[in-house]
Amino acid sequence: MGNQVEENLKTVIQQMELACQASGRSIDDVQLLLATKTVPLEKLQMAMKAGQTLFGENKAQELRGKFPLMQQYKEVEWHFIGHLQTNKVKDVVKYVTLIHSVDRLKLGQALHKQLIKENKTMDILIQINTSYEESKFGASPDMALELAEQLSQLETLNVKGLMTIGKLNATNDETRNCFRLLKKIQTQIKDKKLPRVEMDILSMGMSGDFKVAIEEGATLIRVGTSVFGERYLPDSYYWNEHASQDD
Ligand SMILES: *Cc1c(COP(=O)(O)O)cnc(C)c1O
């Protein structure tokens, strides 16, 4: 018998397949990212051994702690999915290939400044607060287009799409509305044909709602609990109170 992480991973992939079939999509069009917050290295390693190659981290500091694993599993790609403070961009730029959580111009500018220094470019997503909940980060849907226009003027940043956290503890319909709104904003921004703005990635759906997200067009889902089990820290630790908005 395989380990629990491996079993859970298989189950999630089966569920992804079912959701893809149900909505006439190919599983090749939906990437699975495993959210690693609070997860011990041994469990991450189990997932890597089982063939998982995409992981997402919420905090710059914890990303640094993954460095030994990065050295060992070179084929693994890391994304940044958490709230990012402007004074932490350096570490993040060093380790990740995609930042999902760019939600304000000030952060874009801080990234741009660091990237110029390093003579690099970075792929990013714009995070949108589609549930209009106070406790979550993300640009307001009404500001999305303006933010995309502003970010498109920073030539070190490639805007690859959008990210959202769907409404939590909500009905399927409420969550579905969040994902539909993200899809709608994707089309609006795409139609503007801004420089370096491609809009191919829709990062939406977590353990509780990834099936709905796939039905609504997610191209990347972010799953933690379903694979690694319950976390000992509440998500509020990552999503609001402790992380101060720095602008
Ligand atoms: C924790 C987290 C996830 C995964 O959440 P689960 O409910 O454990 O699947 C996805 N996205 C973000 C931004 C997260 O912080």
Image: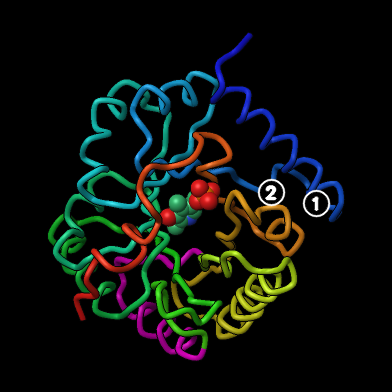
Residue at 69% across / 76% down in the picture?
Answer: 177
Front in this rendered view, residue 21 or 40 = 40
**What secondary structure is found at the residue carrying circle 1?**
loop
Q: Do the residues labelled 2 and 1 touch (CB within 8 Å)?
A: yes
Please say if 85 is above or below 44.
Answer: below
Q: In which quarter of the image is residue 81?
A: bottom left
- Residue 201 visible in the shown view: no
The numbered disc on residue 25 is: 1
Tell me which amino acid carries mark 1: Arg
Give the residue number, with chain letter if any, for mark 2.
29
Front in this rendered view, residue 191 or 131 = 131
Q: Label 1: few (<14), some or many (≥20) within 10 Å?
A: some
State which region is magenta. Answer: 142-160
150 drawn magenta: yes
- Marks 2 and 1 sit apart, C-alpha to C-alpha, by 7 Å
Tell me which amino acid carries mark 2: Asp
- Counting from the top left corner in percent of width and height, residue 189 is at 56, 81
Quadrant that contains the N terminus: top right
**What secondary structure is found at the residue carrying circle 2?**
helix
Residue at 60% across / 49% down in the picture?
Answer: 207
